[in-house]
Amino acid sequence: GESVGLHLPTLSVQEGDNSIINCAYSNSASDYFIWYKQESGKGPQFIIDIRSNMDKRQGQRVTVLLNKTVKHLSLQIAATQPGDSAVYFCAENQNDYKLSFGAGTTVTVRA
Amino acid sequence: EADIYQTPRYLVIGTGKKITLECSQTMGHDKMYWYQQDPGMELHLIHYSYGVNSTEKGDLSSESTVSRIRTEHFPLTLESARPSHTSQYLCASSETAGGHFEQFFGPGTRLTVL
């Protein structure tokens, strides 16, 4: 699979490989995190969320990992497909019903 | 698929015009939000509302205004549009249920001011 250790604005991945998208969050008081996927011309779409009392959460083909020690969040996509091409955003919540979004990562899937 | 709608989807207008971007949701959510987003860039919160007759400014300063007279409706108005207002505007809604703060987004309005 392909991964980035630090946040990079773009990620190119071969179809069928696993991809890892990284995100660093800013506030140690944040207790809820979300990953969104935004396709061209559309609004962001919820992928998966995780609370700060968890380290890992799995969904369908996706896994989110949370490392509170270094304030790092990652999204792993298994067996990346062409339909996974999009911009991915992480967002954090500080229990005030607002979300703070990070810079997105554009994922391009190569056939 | 979230039941949140934005109109128009695309708008091209001249400088100085007054515009209103519409946002409606049919989920009965009490909280609604407006974000501004340049292509491929992060989302910036410009307005939010926690219920009817409640509106607050977000983290990014904006010359737009909002109103929340009905739960399902959260329009955004620009009294005098300028080229610097050219951007994509995204509306979202959420409810407080089980400690989840997921926001559901509309498709966005892409505004171009000439």
Image (tube, coloured by chain):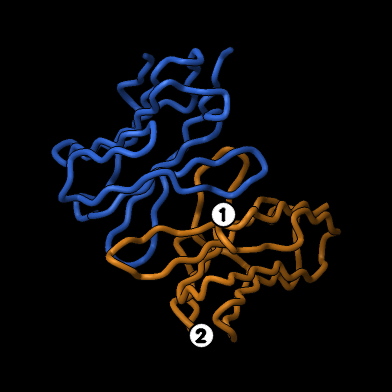
Of residues B77 and B24, which is closer to you in this image? B24
> Which chain does the numbered disc 1 sit on?
B
Per the image, the residue denoted by label 2 is: B52
Say few, some or many: other residues with alpha carbon within 10 Å of mark 2 (under 14 / 14 to 19 / 20 or more).
some
The amino acid pointed to by label 1 is: Glu
State how far apart marks 2 and 1 are (Cα).
24 Å
Judge the density around disc 1: few (<14), some (14-19), many (≥20) Cα neighbours within 10 Å: few
Q: Is residue A35 left or right of residue A55?
A: right
Which colour denotes chain A? blue
In the image, taking residue A77 as reference, residue B48 lies left or right, namely: right
Residue B83, image x and y in percent? 75, 53
Residue nearest the observer in this picture, B60 or A106: A106
Which chain is home to disc 2? B
Question: Which label is found at residue B1?
Answer: 1
The kind of residue tagged 2 is Val
Identify which residue is drawn at 42% across, 15% down: A17
Q: Disc 2 on helix, strand or loop?
A: loop
Q: Which residue is depicted at the point 36% across and 33% down?
A: A62
For label 1, the SS is loop
Residue B4: x %, y % from top left:
60, 63
- Above or below, A83 relative to B96: above
Which shade is chain B? orange
Q: Look at 79% across and 71% down and name the residue there.
A: B18
Task: Give coordinates of residue B15: x percent, y percent.
Answer: 82, 60
